[in-house]
Image (cartoon, rainbow, N blue to C red):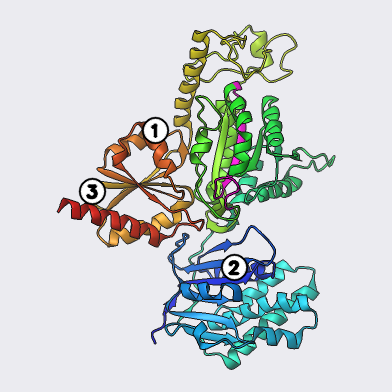
Amino acid sequence: MNRIEAVNDFVVKFANVNGSGSASANELFAKSILRMGVPVSPRNIFPSNIQGLPTWYEVRVTEKGWLGRRGGVDMMVAMNPQTWDADVAELSPGGYLFYDNTRPLPPSKFRDDVHVIGMPLTEICNAVYDDPRQRQLFKNIVYVGALSVLLEIDPKEIEKLFGEQYKGKERLLSSNVQALHLGREFAEEHLNYPLGIRVRRSDRVGKRIFVDGNSACALGAVYGGASVMAWYPITPSSSVAEAFQKYCSKMRVDKETGQHNYAIVQAEDELASIGMVVGAGWNGARAYTATSGPGVSLMTEFIGLAQFAEIPVTIVNVQRGGPSTGMPTRTQQADILSCAYASHGDTKHVLLLPEDPHECFEHTAKALDLADRLQTPVFVMTDLDIGMNQRLCNPFDWQEGQEYDRGKVMTHEDLEAGKDFGRYKDVDGDGIPWRTLPGTHPTKGSYFTRGTTRDPYARYSERGPDYIYNMERLLRKFRTAALLVPQPVVRRAARKARLGVIYYGSTSPAMLEALEVLAAEGIALDAMRLRAFPFPDSVAEFIASHDQVFVVEQNRDGQMRSLLVNELEVDPARLVKVVHYDGTPITARFITQAITAQVQEQRENVA
């Protein structure tokens, strides 16, 4: 039987039971390979219910540095009898099946084209540990030890990780090291090693850091000057608030007085949280919330108020599957349209589209600047794949002394000098009015904040011309926003291409790999990664310069494609949707196969 042979280029998938303590052991496996200088891209696939349901952890090892899912599994660590059949079926021919053979399974449970590696994990742990919980927890470490032998992972790197995790807790440190070596000793004595897939020390990680997107957003908010956060817990965004609390407690506490220079409020629901953020933004604070699709649905009236009353608000939306409760622990890019047009009436909002934790940091800080500059809500559109999975990315960068962009704020001196103040008046031609902050002046610069129509001086008005003036000015401000948001990134094919592809956000890692594969197959594509909405002119120009453009995204209806058609008035036939929406992160293989099939069909039609 053939076997998969690969060094520093394979996929290992762990099939476990939720609540078994496997997550930390699987993460340990991934980090130990990373410490050997080999890039990894892990993804945690877990259920919404924590009571013993199946959970998976997939680790892609690739010296080339691809960070998207490849598709396919080379080794399955099958620890869950409930999902055995599906897990075994997922293995590629010639792959490796590692399992606990304490209890024998019938031959019908195995495949003839995969290599089976049995190890009596339960028996080993029962012989060493008396406590049932220890038996379960250390079983995970025992299989990591065995895998370190089979795949030639340096055990010293694992021990260093233990040392960092259990610093000052020597009892826990020694017990974990013991379990690791239990697994290693058994594998060395009883198993054939190494396998066809294995790890070899390299230096391809460089200075990159390993961090999740939610933590990056939280740190970006700290550096971006956010001093108020109001939120309500919702998967997969809750850890944004938890990380913000952690960073603020270190970086926003006055060393001399102990005073906390921030406010974090867990509200009673999403409506209350966005209301608090709107109030704080009106008062001059940099304020934000973090939520997911269902939370945005509940917030839309307040979001519309902030847009129309022109109050700075930042919203981090960590997207998940929908509609309704949808799939709380699965990823999608399914809120594009609902956020772009959140609230009723003619409403449009700024969306930032980070591709990885590095841009989560940058875009969250940028969003706080843009919200102030534009006096409007700004969404940071991440998703579960970016938010809750650790990813290799470039280190965060922040210039010392960097000043925040507070936009057009009239000061006490401006008002004293007699400057004309019309709260909703466009005096600079960019659609952005001047504002004052509460308490700026005792007698000048006051205005009534309302969600109803008004004239340029904030006086209540139902006159048609006043309404049209305000709505046209808001549209002009939105066009100004297109000049201020992060601009698209274009990657040209090696030769002139009549076809293009547009993608954004967490689709990026898989798309970059797919572009290389497609080029090797003779399919030339110019590529544009969108980084924000509203779209700058370069997006329309990119589409116009190609016969057809594929739009790759992770939702059923091709929401970004719809937004492009609606906003740029593009002929829909020019935009070909490539959609992936089963809740798992898109793979390079899926993109490659989908585009290849479309190109082949076009060639056949021409012929």
Residue 128 lies in quadrant: bottom right
- Residue that label 3 marks: 496
Left or right? Give the position of 277 relative to 151: right
Residue 248, position as x, y percentages in the image: 73, 45
300 and 436: which is toward the camera: 300
Residue 125, position as x, y percentages in the image: 71, 84
**Mark 1 or 2, closer to the camera:** 1
Q: Which residues are magenta?
A: 309-327
Q: Is residue 324 magenta?
A: yes
Residue type at tag 3: Lys
Residue 2, position as x, y percentages in the image: 38, 84
Q: Residue at x 28, y 62 (%)?
A: 520
> Crowdedness of circle 1 by 10 Å Cα count: few (<14), some, many (20+)?
few
SS for callout 2:
helix
- Residue that label 1 marks: 566
Disc tally is 3
Query: N-terminal of the two: label 3 or label 1?
Result: 3
- Is there any visible trace of residue 399 in the rendered image? no
